[in-house]
Image (cartoon, rainbow, N blue to C red):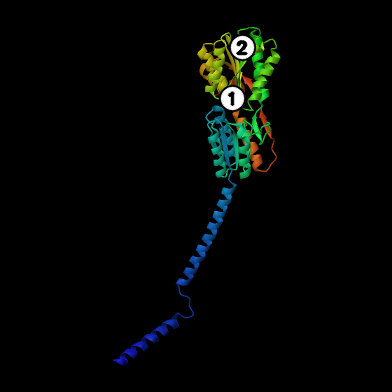
């Protein structure tokens, strides 16, 4: 029995030696495949790494612009935002529109969100200019360029802290004052004691103050015989509702005035005055000159020239401010020198001229 076991062990040893001899000098068939797979995996990993690096670089170079507007539900800012968005997208970027709802807290939150999301730049109209330094400081610390649209970011002395794009305020005010002065002359209203001029003002907004000043200065220059005691002011916050309330208070407080001439700091305030005159039953003989024409055109489109006391409005396209603010911002992002002030001029339109002058904006 012992001999059989030994014989079997010898046979197994011999067979193993023969098998080893047959495979010696050759690489096992599986080895090349395993080596090729590993090489392929390494190549794929390298390619993936390169793609990831490219994606990261692309993400880092993406253009992301925030447009943060104090009253983003108003027609002016909606139109301005649309133009800014188109300009950013034309440059290959993304535009985020934010309505601060005239709320300083919401506004600062929007600024912080833009910074947290690594915005490439910000165009903004602040609801409170006393916040200007805080906004500029936040942006500077984050390395994010900022451009003020409409209302300047400025210090207590009125010096601009960031580039500004808006309307040529005083000159546009003068245009409205001149139009009203000519209206008074043509209708022999200068010395009529029942005629009053109401100027809607926003004394806390630096960009609006020159508008009212230009209106007053040019009107009194061209119609010096108009008694300045019959020139009134109504201050409001830029909204139609507050404009209506402010105008109504003045109108009610001066029943001796039967014919009202009105102009103001923005279109909303003038429309508020139109509604106040309608409520008082004094709209038939009144003459209101708006500032922006983006609401006057609705009056004329919907009611016709004879259906409203809005008789004219200074037209300056919101698109010019929207596009201009992005143009200046892109210059900052690219490290270029940009002007601290970019002003847009206006032309006064009437029911007879607005469609030709405003084009698509008249629709």
Q: Nearer the viewer, residue 86 or 231?
A: 231
Label 1 CA crowd tier, 10 Å (few <14, some 14–19, many 20+)? few
Position of the N terminus by quadrant? bottom left
Residue 16 at least partly seen: yes
**N-terminal of the two: label 2 or label 1?**
2
* Mark 2 residue element: strand
Q: Position of residue 254 (x, y in %)?
A: 57, 11
Where is mark 1, residue-wise? 359
Mark closer to the observer (2, 1): 2
Which residue shows up at 61% across the image and 9% down it? 195
Task: Say which residue label 2 marks.
Answer: 196
Per the rendering, the mark at residue 221 is: none
In the picture shown, does residue 236 fall above or below 117?
Answer: above
Q: In which image quadrant can residue 97 be found?
A: top right
Residue found 64% across the figure and 19% down from its top: 176
In the image, residue 109 lies at what x, y percent?
54, 38
Residue 307 or 177: which is nearer the viewer?
177
Q: Quadrant of the C terminus?
A: top right
């Amino acid at each position: 029995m012992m001999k059989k076991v030994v014989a079997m062990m010898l046979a197994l040893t011999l067979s193993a030696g023969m098998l080893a001899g047959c495979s010696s000098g050759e690489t096992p068939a599986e080895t090349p495949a395993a080596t090729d797979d590993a090489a392929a995996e390494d190549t794929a990993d390298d390619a993936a790494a390169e793609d990831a690096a490219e994606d990261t670089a692309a993400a880092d170079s993406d253009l992301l612009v925030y447009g943060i507007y104090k009253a983003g539900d108003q027609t002016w800012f909606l139109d301005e935002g649309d133009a800014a968005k188109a300009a950013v997208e034309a440059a290959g970027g993304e535009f985020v529109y934010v309505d601060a709802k005239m709320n300083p807290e919401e506004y600062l939150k929007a600024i912080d969100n833009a910074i947290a999301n690594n915005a490439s730049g910000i165009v903004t109209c602040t609801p409170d200019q006393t916040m200007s330094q805080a906004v500029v400081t936040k942006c500077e610390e984050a390395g994010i360029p900022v451009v003020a649209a409409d209302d300047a970011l400025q210090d207590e002395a009125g010096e601009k802290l960031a580039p500004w794009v808006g309307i040529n305020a005083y000159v546009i005010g003068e245009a409205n004052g001149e139009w009203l002065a000519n209206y008074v002359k043509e209708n022999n209203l200068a010395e009529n004691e029942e005629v009053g001029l109401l100027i809607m003002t926003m004394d806390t907004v630096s960009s609006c103050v020159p508008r009212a000043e230009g209106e007053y200065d040019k009107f009194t220059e061209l119609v010096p015989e108009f008694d300045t005691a019959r020139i009134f002011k109504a201050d409001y916050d830029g909204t139609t509702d507050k404009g209506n309330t402010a105008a109504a208070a003045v109108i009610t407080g001066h029943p001796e005035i039967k014919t009202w001439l009105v102009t103001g700091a923005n279109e909303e305030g003038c429309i508020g005055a139109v509604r106040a005159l309608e409520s008082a039953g004094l709209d038939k003989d009144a003459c209101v000159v708006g500032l922006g024409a983006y609401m006057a055109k609705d009056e004329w489109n919907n009611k016709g020239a004879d259906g409203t006391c809005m008789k004219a409005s200074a037209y300056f396209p919101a698109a010019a401010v929207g596009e201009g603010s992005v143009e200046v911002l892109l210059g900052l992002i690219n490290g270029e020198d940009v002007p601290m002030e970019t002003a847009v001029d206006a032309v006064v339109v009437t029911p007879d001229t607005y469609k030709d002058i405003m084009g698509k904006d008249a629709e």
